[in-house]
Image (cartoon, rainbow, N blue to C red):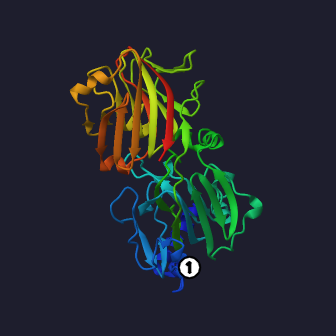
Amino acid sequence: MKRNLCRNLFRTLAGSGIIAACLCSCGSKHNTLTEAEIADGWQLLFDGKTLDQWKDFNGDSLTQPWHVVDGCIQAAGDGSDLSGYIVTKKQYENFILDWDWKLSPGGNSGMLYHVVENPYFAVPYVTGPEYQLIDNDGWEAQNAPTKLEPWQRLGVDYAMHLPDADSLFVNPQGEWNSSRIVCDNGHVEHWLNGRKILEFEAWTDDWFARKNSGKWETAPEYGLAHRGVLCLQDHGYPASFRNLKVKELPRKAGRETELFNGRDLTGWEAYGTEKWYVDKEGNLVCESGPDKQYGYLATREYYDDFDLTLEFKQLSNGNSGVFFRSFVEPPVKVHGWQCEVAPKGHDTAGIYESYGRGWLVQIPDEKESILKEGDWNTLRLKVQGDRVQTWLNGEEMVDITDAKIGAAQGRIALQIHDGGGIKVLWRNLRLTTL
Protein backbone atom coordinates (compact mmCIF):
# COMPACT_ATOMS: atom_id res chain seq x y z
CA MET A 1 0.00 0.00 0.00
CA LYS A 2 2.84 2.38 0.89
CA ARG A 3 4.51 1.80 -2.47
CA ASN A 4 1.24 2.32 -4.38
CA LEU A 5 0.55 5.59 -2.59
CA CYS A 6 4.04 6.78 -3.37
CA ARG A 7 3.75 5.79 -7.03
CA ASN A 8 0.40 7.57 -7.35
CA LEU A 9 1.88 10.69 -5.81
CA PHE A 10 4.75 10.72 -8.28
CA ARG A 11 2.39 10.18 -11.21
CA THR A 12 0.25 13.07 -10.04
CA LEU A 13 3.28 15.29 -9.70
CA ALA A 14 4.54 14.12 -13.09
CA GLY A 15 1.26 15.22 -14.63
CA SER A 16 1.70 18.65 -13.10
CA GLY A 17 5.23 18.99 -14.46
CA ILE A 18 6.92 18.99 -11.05
CA ILE A 19 8.59 15.60 -11.45
CA ALA A 20 9.61 16.47 -15.00
CA ALA A 21 11.39 19.52 -13.75
CA CYS A 22 13.04 17.65 -10.88
CA LEU A 23 14.12 14.68 -12.93
CA CYS A 24 15.36 16.57 -15.97
CA SER A 25 16.64 20.15 -16.10
CA CYS A 26 19.23 19.02 -18.61
CA GLY A 27 20.13 22.30 -20.19
CA SER A 28 21.42 22.88 -23.69
CA LYS A 29 24.98 21.61 -23.17
CA HIS A 30 23.91 17.98 -23.05
CA ASN A 31 23.13 15.43 -25.77
CA THR A 32 25.97 16.61 -27.98
CA LEU A 33 29.28 15.16 -29.15
CA THR A 34 32.62 16.90 -29.28
CA GLU A 35 34.63 16.93 -32.48
CA ALA A 36 37.05 14.47 -30.86
CA GLU A 37 34.21 12.07 -30.00
CA ILE A 38 32.85 12.23 -33.53
CA ALA A 39 36.30 11.53 -34.93
CA ASP A 40 36.59 8.58 -32.54
CA GLY A 41 33.39 7.00 -33.84
CA TRP A 42 30.86 7.97 -31.18
CA GLN A 43 27.22 8.37 -32.19
CA LEU A 44 24.31 9.92 -30.31
CA LEU A 45 21.30 7.75 -29.51
CA PHE A 46 19.24 10.80 -28.50
CA ASP A 47 19.52 14.35 -29.80
CA GLY A 48 17.66 15.97 -26.90
CA LYS A 49 14.66 16.75 -29.08
CA THR A 50 13.12 13.62 -30.62
CA LEU A 51 12.87 9.86 -30.07
CA ASP A 52 13.39 9.11 -33.75
CA GLN A 53 15.98 6.42 -32.99
CA TRP A 54 13.66 4.51 -30.62
CA LYS A 55 10.55 2.35 -30.94
CA ASP A 56 8.45 -0.12 -28.98
CA PHE A 57 9.97 -3.50 -28.22
CA ASN A 58 8.70 -5.87 -30.94
CA GLY A 59 7.03 -2.90 -32.63
CA ASP A 60 7.48 -0.75 -35.72
CA SER A 61 6.91 2.64 -34.11
CA LEU A 62 6.91 4.35 -30.72
CA THR A 63 3.62 4.15 -28.85
CA GLN A 64 4.85 3.56 -25.28
CA PRO A 65 4.45 6.56 -22.95
CA TRP A 66 8.02 7.85 -23.12
CA HIS A 67 8.53 11.56 -23.74
CA VAL A 68 11.17 14.17 -24.37
CA VAL A 69 11.10 16.59 -21.43
CA ASP A 70 13.59 19.46 -21.16
CA GLY A 71 16.21 17.62 -23.20
CA CYS A 72 15.78 14.26 -21.46
CA ILE A 73 14.16 10.97 -22.33
CA GLN A 74 11.62 10.46 -19.58
CA ALA A 75 9.58 7.48 -18.47
CA ALA A 76 6.48 8.59 -16.60
CA GLY A 77 6.36 5.41 -14.53
CA ASP A 78 3.43 3.73 -16.25
CA GLY A 79 5.32 0.58 -17.22
CA SER A 80 5.23 -2.87 -15.68
CA ASP A 81 6.98 -6.19 -15.97
CA LEU A 82 5.19 -6.85 -19.28
CA SER A 83 5.17 -3.35 -20.79
CA GLY A 84 6.97 -0.04 -20.94
CA TYR A 85 10.06 -1.04 -22.92
CA ILE A 86 11.55 1.03 -25.74
CA VAL A 87 14.43 -0.14 -27.92
CA THR A 88 16.80 1.29 -30.48
CA LYS A 89 15.87 0.82 -34.11
CA LYS A 90 19.42 -0.34 -34.78
CA GLN A 91 21.11 -3.49 -33.48
CA TYR A 92 24.51 -3.36 -31.80
CA GLU A 93 27.06 -6.16 -31.40
CA ASN A 94 30.29 -4.90 -29.80
CA PHE A 95 30.22 -1.41 -28.31
CA ILE A 96 30.87 1.09 -25.57
CA LEU A 97 27.61 2.62 -24.33
CA ASP A 98 27.47 5.72 -22.13
CA TRP A 99 24.46 7.42 -20.56
CA ASP A 100 23.35 9.62 -17.65
CA TRP A 101 20.35 8.68 -15.54
CA LYS A 102 18.23 9.96 -12.69
CA LEU A 103 15.53 8.03 -10.83
CA SER A 104 12.61 9.08 -8.66
CA PRO A 105 12.91 8.11 -4.97
CA GLY A 106 12.66 4.33 -4.76
CA GLY A 107 12.90 4.15 -8.56
CA ASN A 108 13.61 1.03 -10.56
CA SER A 109 14.72 0.91 -14.20
CA GLY A 110 17.41 -0.66 -16.35
CA MET A 111 19.47 -0.66 -19.53
CA LEU A 112 19.42 -3.91 -21.51
CA TYR A 113 21.49 -4.89 -24.52
CA HIS A 114 21.68 -7.71 -27.10
CA VAL A 115 17.89 -7.87 -26.87
CA VAL A 116 16.33 -10.13 -29.51
CA GLU A 117 13.06 -8.98 -31.06
CA ASN A 118 10.72 -11.81 -31.97
CA PRO A 119 7.00 -12.27 -31.22
CA TYR A 120 7.89 -15.42 -29.32
CA PHE A 121 9.83 -13.33 -26.74
CA ALA A 122 7.19 -11.35 -24.86
CA VAL A 123 9.67 -9.29 -22.82
CA PRO A 124 13.23 -8.13 -23.49
CA TYR A 125 14.86 -9.57 -20.37
CA VAL A 126 14.45 -13.21 -21.40
CA THR A 127 17.12 -12.59 -24.05
CA GLY A 128 18.99 -9.39 -23.11
CA PRO A 129 21.33 -8.90 -20.11
CA GLU A 130 20.53 -5.92 -17.92
CA TYR A 131 22.55 -3.23 -16.16
CA GLN A 132 20.28 -2.69 -13.16
CA LEU A 133 19.29 0.87 -12.26
CA ILE A 134 17.58 1.18 -8.90
CA ASP A 135 17.49 3.41 -5.82
CA ASN A 136 18.52 0.72 -3.35
CA ASP A 137 17.70 2.49 -0.09
CA GLY A 138 14.59 4.22 -1.36
CA TRP A 139 13.19 1.02 -2.88
CA GLU A 140 13.67 -0.91 0.36
CA ALA A 141 12.12 1.94 2.38
CA GLN A 142 9.03 1.93 0.15
CA ASN A 143 8.76 -1.86 0.15
CA ALA A 144 9.70 -2.60 3.76
CA PRO A 145 10.21 -5.15 5.14
CA THR A 146 11.14 -6.63 1.73
CA LYS A 147 14.85 -6.39 1.00
CA LEU A 148 16.57 -6.47 -2.37
CA GLU A 149 18.60 -9.55 -3.13
CA PRO A 150 22.29 -8.80 -3.87
CA TRP A 151 21.69 -9.67 -7.55
CA GLN A 152 18.88 -7.08 -7.77
CA ARG A 153 20.84 -4.05 -6.57
CA LEU A 154 22.27 -1.09 -8.46
CA GLY A 155 24.90 -1.82 -11.07
CA VAL A 156 24.56 -5.60 -11.15
CA ASP A 157 24.53 -7.69 -14.28
CA TYR A 158 21.02 -8.68 -13.30
CA ALA A 159 20.83 -12.10 -11.63
CA MET A 160 24.32 -12.98 -12.90
CA HIS A 161 27.28 -10.88 -11.69
CA LEU A 162 27.69 -8.58 -8.70
CA PRO A 163 29.72 -5.35 -8.57
CA ASP A 164 32.68 -4.77 -6.30
CA ALA A 165 31.05 -3.04 -3.32
CA ASP A 166 34.16 -0.92 -2.69
CA SER A 167 33.99 0.52 -6.21
CA LEU A 168 30.41 1.78 -5.96
CA PHE A 169 30.04 5.54 -5.74
CA VAL A 170 26.45 6.79 -6.12
CA ASN A 171 25.45 10.42 -6.16
CA PRO A 172 22.76 11.48 -3.68
CA GLN A 173 19.14 10.87 -4.61
CA GLY A 174 17.91 13.51 -7.04
CA GLU A 175 21.31 14.01 -8.70
CA TRP A 176 22.50 12.64 -12.04
CA ASN A 177 24.67 9.53 -12.29
CA SER A 178 26.59 8.28 -15.31
CA SER A 179 26.97 4.66 -16.43
CA ARG A 180 28.87 2.74 -19.07
CA ILE A 181 28.62 -0.74 -20.55
CA VAL A 182 31.55 -2.16 -22.50
CA CYS A 183 30.70 -5.20 -24.61
CA ASP A 184 33.75 -6.34 -26.56
CA ASN A 185 33.52 -9.79 -28.15
CA GLY A 186 32.31 -11.41 -24.94
CA HIS A 187 34.26 -9.22 -22.50
CA VAL A 188 31.76 -7.12 -20.52
CA GLU A 189 32.34 -4.24 -18.11
CA HIS A 190 29.95 -2.13 -16.03
CA TRP A 191 31.03 1.36 -14.97
CA LEU A 192 29.37 3.81 -12.58
CA ASN A 193 30.39 7.45 -12.22
CA GLY A 194 33.78 6.88 -13.81
CA ARG A 195 34.66 3.72 -11.91
CA LYS A 196 34.64 0.16 -13.19
CA ILE A 197 32.38 -1.81 -10.85
CA LEU A 198 32.37 -5.26 -12.46
CA GLU A 199 33.69 -7.23 -15.43
CA PHE A 200 33.24 -10.76 -16.74
CA GLU A 201 33.64 -12.96 -19.78
CA ALA A 202 30.36 -14.05 -21.36
CA TRP A 203 29.76 -17.56 -22.74
CA THR A 204 32.43 -19.25 -20.60
CA ASP A 205 31.88 -22.32 -18.41
CA ASP A 206 31.44 -20.03 -15.39
CA TRP A 207 28.93 -17.85 -17.28
CA PHE A 208 26.85 -20.86 -18.32
CA ALA A 209 26.94 -22.26 -14.79
CA ARG A 210 25.47 -19.00 -13.49
CA LYS A 211 22.87 -18.87 -16.27
CA ASN A 212 21.70 -22.43 -15.71
CA SER A 213 21.49 -22.35 -11.90
CA GLY A 214 19.50 -19.21 -11.14
CA LYS A 215 16.77 -16.97 -12.47
CA TRP A 216 17.56 -17.78 -16.11
CA GLU A 217 17.53 -21.58 -15.95
CA THR A 218 14.04 -21.57 -17.53
CA ALA A 219 14.99 -18.93 -20.14
CA PRO A 220 17.07 -20.99 -22.60
CA GLU A 221 17.94 -18.07 -24.90
CA TYR A 222 18.92 -15.60 -22.17
CA GLY A 223 22.20 -13.83 -22.90
CA LEU A 224 23.16 -15.97 -25.89
CA ALA A 225 22.74 -13.37 -28.63
CA HIS A 226 25.90 -11.67 -29.85
CA ARG A 227 23.96 -8.67 -31.18
CA GLY A 228 20.62 -7.01 -30.59
CA VAL A 229 18.83 -3.79 -29.79
CA LEU A 230 19.46 -1.63 -26.74
CA CYS A 231 16.50 -1.28 -24.38
CA LEU A 232 15.33 1.19 -21.74
CA GLN A 233 12.96 -0.07 -19.07
CA ASP A 234 10.00 1.70 -17.45
CA HIS A 235 9.44 -0.50 -14.40
CA GLY A 236 6.64 1.56 -12.88
CA TYR A 237 8.73 4.47 -11.63
CA PRO A 238 9.60 7.83 -13.24
CA ALA A 239 13.11 7.93 -14.68
CA SER A 240 15.10 10.26 -16.92
CA PHE A 241 18.01 9.69 -19.29
CA ARG A 242 20.34 11.97 -21.24
CA ASN A 243 23.71 11.91 -23.02
CA LEU A 244 23.06 8.48 -24.53
CA LYS A 245 25.90 7.71 -26.91
CA VAL A 246 27.51 4.61 -28.36
CA LYS A 247 30.79 3.69 -30.01
CA GLU A 248 30.76 0.46 -32.00
CA LEU A 249 33.72 -1.89 -31.69
CA PRO A 250 34.92 -4.38 -34.33
CA ARG A 251 34.04 -8.06 -34.36
CA LYS A 252 36.94 -10.44 -33.81
CA ALA A 253 36.52 -13.18 -36.42
CA GLY A 254 38.60 -16.22 -37.27
CA ARG A 255 38.07 -18.15 -34.03
CA GLU A 256 38.41 -21.88 -34.66
CA THR A 257 36.24 -24.16 -32.53
CA GLU A 258 35.87 -27.93 -32.16
CA LEU A 259 32.15 -28.19 -31.41
CA PHE A 260 32.50 -31.83 -30.31
CA ASN A 261 35.41 -33.00 -28.17
CA GLY A 262 35.08 -36.74 -28.96
CA ARG A 263 34.54 -37.63 -25.29
CA ASP A 264 31.27 -36.18 -23.98
CA LEU A 265 28.54 -33.65 -24.73
CA THR A 266 30.26 -30.63 -23.17
CA GLY A 267 29.08 -27.46 -24.93
CA TRP A 268 25.77 -28.99 -26.00
CA GLU A 269 22.24 -29.07 -24.54
CA ALA A 270 19.76 -31.85 -25.31
CA TYR A 271 16.04 -31.28 -25.82
CA GLY A 272 13.53 -34.12 -25.91
CA THR A 273 13.72 -37.75 -24.83
CA GLU A 274 15.66 -39.15 -27.79
CA LYS A 275 19.18 -40.52 -27.30
CA TRP A 276 22.44 -38.59 -27.61
CA TYR A 277 25.70 -40.23 -26.54
CA VAL A 278 29.34 -40.86 -27.45
CA ASP A 279 30.27 -44.36 -28.59
CA LYS A 280 33.53 -46.21 -27.87
CA GLU A 281 35.07 -44.97 -31.12
CA GLY A 282 34.50 -41.35 -30.07
CA ASN A 283 31.61 -40.67 -32.42
CA LEU A 284 28.60 -38.56 -31.45
CA VAL A 285 25.51 -40.72 -31.84
CA CYS A 286 21.90 -39.64 -32.25
CA GLU A 287 19.35 -42.43 -31.96
CA SER A 288 15.59 -42.63 -31.70
CA GLY A 289 14.24 -43.48 -28.26
CA PRO A 290 11.06 -45.25 -27.19
CA ASP A 291 8.97 -42.09 -27.68
CA LYS A 292 9.93 -41.86 -31.38
CA GLN A 293 9.62 -38.07 -31.27
CA TYR A 294 11.74 -35.15 -32.43
CA GLY A 295 14.96 -34.62 -30.53
CA TYR A 296 17.64 -31.94 -30.68
CA LEU A 297 21.18 -31.45 -29.47
CA ALA A 298 21.92 -27.73 -29.58
CA THR A 299 25.09 -25.76 -28.99
CA ARG A 300 24.87 -23.76 -25.82
CA GLU A 301 26.34 -20.79 -27.72
CA TYR A 302 25.10 -18.78 -30.68
CA TYR A 303 27.03 -18.90 -33.94
CA ASP A 304 25.88 -16.40 -36.55
CA ASP A 305 28.53 -16.09 -39.29
CA PHE A 306 30.57 -19.27 -39.60
CA ASP A 307 32.11 -21.93 -41.80
CA LEU A 308 31.31 -25.40 -40.44
CA THR A 309 32.53 -28.78 -41.65
CA LEU A 310 31.45 -32.10 -40.19
CA GLU A 311 31.24 -35.77 -41.06
CA PHE A 312 28.16 -37.97 -40.70
CA LYS A 313 27.28 -41.60 -41.31
CA GLN A 314 23.67 -42.70 -41.59
CA LEU A 315 22.83 -46.04 -39.98
CA SER A 316 19.30 -47.35 -40.40
CA ASN A 317 17.03 -44.42 -41.28
CA GLY A 318 19.24 -41.34 -41.57
CA ASN A 319 16.60 -38.62 -41.29
CA SER A 320 18.33 -35.82 -39.40
CA GLY A 321 19.64 -32.32 -40.03
CA VAL A 322 21.90 -29.47 -38.97
CA PHE A 323 19.98 -26.42 -37.75
CA PHE A 324 21.56 -22.96 -37.79
CA ARG A 325 20.61 -19.49 -36.54
CA SER A 326 17.95 -21.22 -34.48
CA PHE A 327 16.43 -20.81 -31.04
CA VAL A 328 14.72 -23.25 -28.70
CA GLU A 329 11.13 -23.12 -27.55
CA PRO A 330 10.89 -25.56 -24.63
CA PRO A 331 10.36 -28.34 -24.28
CA VAL A 332 11.23 -29.60 -27.80
CA LYS A 333 10.72 -27.08 -30.58
CA VAL A 334 13.49 -25.43 -32.58
CA HIS A 335 12.76 -22.36 -34.72
CA GLY A 336 15.14 -21.62 -37.55
CA TRP A 337 16.74 -23.13 -40.63
CA GLN A 338 17.92 -26.64 -41.33
CA CYS A 339 20.60 -28.00 -43.60
CA GLU A 340 18.96 -31.31 -44.42
CA VAL A 341 20.58 -34.67 -43.65
CA ALA A 342 18.30 -37.42 -44.94
CA PRO A 343 18.22 -40.73 -46.85
CA LYS A 344 19.08 -40.67 -50.54
CA GLY A 345 16.35 -38.99 -52.58
CA HIS A 346 15.41 -36.55 -49.81
CA ASP A 347 17.60 -33.49 -50.46
CA THR A 348 20.60 -33.83 -48.16
CA ALA A 349 22.35 -30.40 -48.02
CA GLY A 350 19.15 -28.57 -49.04
CA ILE A 351 17.81 -25.73 -46.86
CA TYR A 352 14.50 -25.95 -45.00
CA GLU A 353 12.82 -23.38 -42.73
CA SER A 354 11.11 -24.97 -39.75
CA TYR A 355 7.74 -23.56 -38.62
CA GLY A 356 7.91 -21.12 -41.52
CA ARG A 357 8.22 -21.27 -45.28
CA GLY A 358 9.29 -24.91 -45.55
CA TRP A 359 11.77 -25.71 -48.32
CA LEU A 360 13.81 -22.72 -49.46
CA VAL A 361 15.90 -24.77 -51.86
CA GLN A 362 16.03 -28.48 -52.67
CA ILE A 363 18.94 -30.11 -54.46
CA PRO A 364 18.74 -31.23 -58.11
CA ASP A 365 17.82 -34.88 -58.62
CA GLU A 366 21.13 -35.57 -60.37
CA LYS A 367 23.03 -34.62 -57.19
CA GLU A 368 21.26 -37.20 -54.99
CA SER A 369 23.94 -39.77 -55.89
CA ILE A 370 26.61 -37.68 -54.15
CA LEU A 371 25.37 -38.97 -50.79
CA LYS A 372 27.20 -42.13 -49.67
CA GLU A 373 24.76 -44.38 -47.85
CA GLY A 374 26.18 -46.35 -44.94
CA ASP A 375 29.53 -44.55 -45.20
CA TRP A 376 31.05 -41.34 -43.93
CA ASN A 377 30.05 -38.12 -45.71
CA THR A 378 31.58 -34.65 -45.38
CA LEU A 379 29.13 -31.76 -45.10
CA ARG A 380 30.20 -28.12 -45.23
CA LEU A 381 27.84 -25.31 -44.24
CA LYS A 382 28.89 -21.68 -44.63
CA VAL A 383 26.61 -18.92 -43.35
CA GLN A 384 27.60 -15.27 -43.67
CA GLY A 385 25.12 -12.42 -43.55
CA ASP A 386 22.18 -13.41 -45.74
CA ARG A 387 24.13 -15.95 -47.81
CA VAL A 388 24.05 -19.71 -47.19
CA GLN A 389 26.24 -22.22 -49.04
CA THR A 390 26.47 -25.98 -48.65
CA TRP A 391 28.76 -28.66 -50.03
CA LEU A 392 28.45 -32.44 -49.79
CA ASN A 393 31.57 -34.54 -50.26
CA GLY A 394 33.27 -31.59 -51.96
CA GLU A 395 30.43 -30.84 -54.40
CA GLU A 396 28.56 -27.54 -54.14
CA MET A 397 24.89 -28.18 -53.42
CA VAL A 398 23.26 -24.85 -52.43
CA ASP A 399 24.09 -21.17 -52.75
CA ILE A 400 21.26 -18.83 -51.74
CA THR A 401 20.71 -15.39 -50.25
CA ASP A 402 17.74 -14.76 -47.98
CA ALA A 403 16.94 -11.58 -46.05
CA LYS A 404 15.10 -13.41 -43.28
CA ILE A 405 18.11 -15.60 -42.59
CA GLY A 406 20.31 -12.51 -42.72
CA ALA A 407 18.31 -10.87 -39.94
CA ALA A 408 18.40 -13.92 -37.65
CA GLN A 409 20.91 -15.34 -35.20
CA GLY A 410 21.06 -18.38 -33.00
CA ARG A 411 22.36 -21.84 -32.22
CA ILE A 412 23.56 -24.78 -34.25
CA ALA A 413 21.56 -27.92 -33.49
CA LEU A 414 21.54 -31.53 -34.63
CA GLN A 415 18.15 -33.16 -35.11
CA ILE A 416 16.56 -36.57 -34.70
CA HIS A 417 13.43 -36.70 -36.85
CA ASP A 418 10.29 -38.23 -35.41
CA GLY A 419 8.99 -41.63 -36.43
CA GLY A 420 11.63 -43.83 -34.83
CA GLY A 421 14.28 -46.07 -36.32
CA ILE A 422 16.84 -43.27 -36.77
CA LYS A 423 20.55 -43.58 -36.02
CA VAL A 424 23.25 -41.23 -37.29
CA LEU A 425 26.91 -40.90 -36.30
CA TRP A 426 28.72 -37.54 -36.27
CA ARG A 427 32.40 -36.60 -35.92
CA ASN A 428 34.93 -33.83 -36.63
CA LEU A 429 32.56 -30.91 -36.16
CA ARG A 430 34.89 -27.99 -36.82
CA LEU A 431 33.80 -24.35 -37.04
CA THR A 432 35.50 -21.07 -37.88
CA THR A 433 33.77 -17.80 -37.03
CA LEU A 434 33.54 -15.25 -39.86
Name of the residue lying farthest toward the left? 365
Q: Please say whether residue 148 is visible from this viewpoint.
A: no
Q: Find disc 1 in the rendering and name its residue.
A: 36
- Where on the picture, by quarter, is residue 382? top left
Is 164 on the left-hand or right-hand side of 100? right
Q: Nearer the viewer, residue 176 or 407?
A: 407
Question: Residue at horizontal 34%, vertical 49%?
Answer: 386
Against 71, is 299 above or below?
A: above
Q: Amino acid at mark 1?
A: Ala
Q: Nearer the viewer, residue 423 or 399?
A: 399
Q: Secondary structure at mark 1?
A: helix
Comparing 264 with 170, the one in front is 264
Q: Is residue 37 above or below residue 373?
A: below
Count of residue discs: 1
Write the residue at 55% across / 38% down: 257
Looking at the picture, does residue 86 appear above or below residue 431? below
Visible residue check, residue 44: yes
Q: Position of residue 255 (x, y in %)?
A: 55, 45
Mark 1: few/some/many CA within 10 Å (<14, 14-19, 20+): few
User: Split into 4 quadrants, where in the image is the N terminus?
Assistant: bottom right
Foreground residue, 50 or 21? 50
Question: Where residue 315 sits: x, y (%)?
Answer: 41, 14
Q: Is residue 43 left or right of residue 337?
A: right
Q: Position of residue 310 (x, y in %)?
A: 46, 30
Rendered position, 104 above or below 400 = below
Position of residue 49 measured from the top left corner of the image (x, y, whole percent): 42, 80
Query: Residue extending furthest right?
Result: 166
Q: Residue furthest bottom?
A: 28
